[in-house]
Image (cartoon, rainbow, N blue to C red):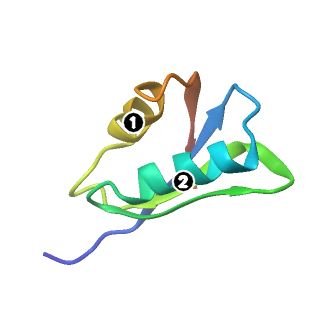
């Protein structure tokens, strides 16, 4: 099966430190089907996640963050 890349933006309500952001990026990046997860230094509440929807859903990405005790919402696909 070919890889299908989809990207979504997730808004994180909390203000996180650099270490916390790195941990969250790594946690999402380690999930099966996720190609990359990153937060821009000037938009630290917005995380862009590139993933293959054949392996993981945007809802699962959101749940991963919420299971870390974060409050977050899906903004939409890009």
Q: Quadrant of residue 35?
A: bottom left
Q: Sequence order check: which comes first, mark 2 or mark 1? A: 2
Q: Is residue 77 visible?
A: no
Q: Is residue 5 visible?
A: yes
Mark 1 surroundings: few (<14), some (14-19) or many (≥20) residues within 10 A: some
Residue at x 22% of width, y 56% of height: 55
Q: What element does badge 2 sit on?
A: helix
Quarter the C terminus occupies: bottom right
Residue at x 32% of width, y 54% of height: 31
On the image, the x and y values in percent for residue 20 come to: 64, 43
Q: Is residue 13 above or below residue 46?
A: above
Mark 2 surroundings: few (<14), some (14-19) or many (≥20) residues within 10 A: some
On the image, the x and y values in percent for residue 65 come to: 47, 34
For residue 53, side relative to residue 27 (left or right): left
| Residue position marked by numbered label 2 in the rendering | 25
Q: Quadrant of residue 15?
A: top right
Tag shown at residue 64? 1
**Residue found at the far left of this picture:** 1
Q: What element does badge 1 sit on?
A: helix
Residue at x 81% of width, y 56% of height: 41
Work out how far the residue at label 2 is from the one at label 1, CA to CA, in angstroms.
11 Å
């Amino acid at each position: 099966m070919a890889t299908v890349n989809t990207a979504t933006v997730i808004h994180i309500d909390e203000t996180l430190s650099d270490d916390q952001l790195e941990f969250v990026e790594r946690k999402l990046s380690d999930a099966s089907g996720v190609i990359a997860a990153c937060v821009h230094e000037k938009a630290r509440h917005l995380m862009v996640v590139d993933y293959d929807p054949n392996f993981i859903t945007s809802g699962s990405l959101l749940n991963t963050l919420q299971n870390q005790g974060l409050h977050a919402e899906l903004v939409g696909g890009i």
